[in-house]
């Protein structure tokens, strides 16, 4: 069974109170950069992996995408997504990202927001996505930045007054499982280096278009000013060549 913390009642109740859960995309500090990397969406068939509450699915349809499929493992996430959605061209599917099965070249665009660091084999997922994307299609995703995921503690060093001193980085080159705390204890993430994310995308056959480590707009999110002291997000935009072998 793949990890599914979002159906844990305590975890989900805390997740529901996060700004990005209440405000949607406007509450996500990385959203302006992610949005800028998206291709033209009009009349496109789109797949959203780890769709959560469906915010990206609904945005894609607002941009006149022809259809959207949102995939998530959590019953609670999908229930909320369906409650917030009134659109026959958005379909939600319950399945682990690792287990997706679609037709060859079914989608014009595949997106994923902050989900792949919960997936054990990003390499296998990239290979699947490459098969499911049409030639010339796009693959855009975000993950927690590897500087953020390197240590299991995933937290600042604080002074005696509780003020953040600096963000420590250790075991960066040691990829693999991190048993950490996010909202609750016992959350499993998978740490990979920046180069591993990039190289696995390239090895799957994609061409890199952009790699971003977005800062948070402190005017919009003054409460997040410390987040800009270290990168929290990594966003990669890639393209499947129009002519494939």
Image (spheres, rainbow, N blue to C red):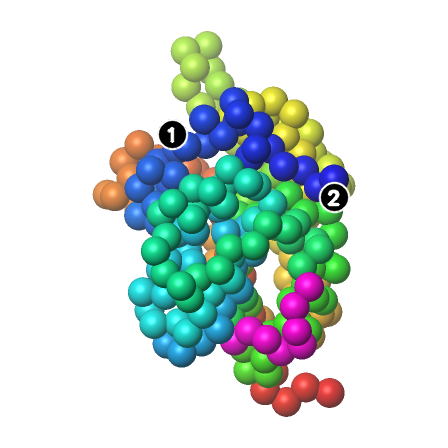
Who's the residue at 45% across and 26% down the image? 14
Q: Is residue 18 above or below residue 205?
A: above
Who's the residue at 55% across and 73% down the image? 107
- Residue 202 seen in this snapshot: no
Badge 1 marks a residue whose secondary structure is loop
Q: Give the residue pinned by disc 2.
A: 175
Q: Horizontally, is 226 left or right of 146 in the view?
A: left
Q: Horizontally, is 54 left or right of 243 in the view?
A: left
**Label 1 vs label 2, nearer the camera:** 1
Inspect the magenta stretch and tell me whether residue 174 lies in it. no
Q: Is residue 121 above or below residue 221?
A: below
Q: CA distance from mark 1 to mark 2?
A: 31 Å
Q: Is residue 174 above or below residue 187?
A: below
Most common secondary structure along the magenta stretch: loop
Quadrant in the rendering for residue 105? bottom right
Who's the residue at 53% across and 25% down the image? 9
The residue closer to the viewer here, 138 or 46, is 46
Quadrant where the C terminus lies? bottom right
Label pair 1/2, CB-CB below 8 angstroms: no
> Which residues are the magenta region?
101-108
Q: Give the residue pinned by disc 1.
A: 17
Q: Horizontally, is 220 left or right of 238 in the view?
A: left
Q: Residue furthest left?
A: 219
Whole-percent x and y of residue 76? 51, 37
Q: Residues within 10 Å of mark 2 (few under 14, many from 20)?
A: some
Whole-percent x and y of residue 225? 34, 35
The residue closer to the viewer here, 241 or 55, is 55
- Residue 186 seen in this snapshot: yes
Quadrant in the rendering for residue 44? bottom left
């Amino acid at each position: 069974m793949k990890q599914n913390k979002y159906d844990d009642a305590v975890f989900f109740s805390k997740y529901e109170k996060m700004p990005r859960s209440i405000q949607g995309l406007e509450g996500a500090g990385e959203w302006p950069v992610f949005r800028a990397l998206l291709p033209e969406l009009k009349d496109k068939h789109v797949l959203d992996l780890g769709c959560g509450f469906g915010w990206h699915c609904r945005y894609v349809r607002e941009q006149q995408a022809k259809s959207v499929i949102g995939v998530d493992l959590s019953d609670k996430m999908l229930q909320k997504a369906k409650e917030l959605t009134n659109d026959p061209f958005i379909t939600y599917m319950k399945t682990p990202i690792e287990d997706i099965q679609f037709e060859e070249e079914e989608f014009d665009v595949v997106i994923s927001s902050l989900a792949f660091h919960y997936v054990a084999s990003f390499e296998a997922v990239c290979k699947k996505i490459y098969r499911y994307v049409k030639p010339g299609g796009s693959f855009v995703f975000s993950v927690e930045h590897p500087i953020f995921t390197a240590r299991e503690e995933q937290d600042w060093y604080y002074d005696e007054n509780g003020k953040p001193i600096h963000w420590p980085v250790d075991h960066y080159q040691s990829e693999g499982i991190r048993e950490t705390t996010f909202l609750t204890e016992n959350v499993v993430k998978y740490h990979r280096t920046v180069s591993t994310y990039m190289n696995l995308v390239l090895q799957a056959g994609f061409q890199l278009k952009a790699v971003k480590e977005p800062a948070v707009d402190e005017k919009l999110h003054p409460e997040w000013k410390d987040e800009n002291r270290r990168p929290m997000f990594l966003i990669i935009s890639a393209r499947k060549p129009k002519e494939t072998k």
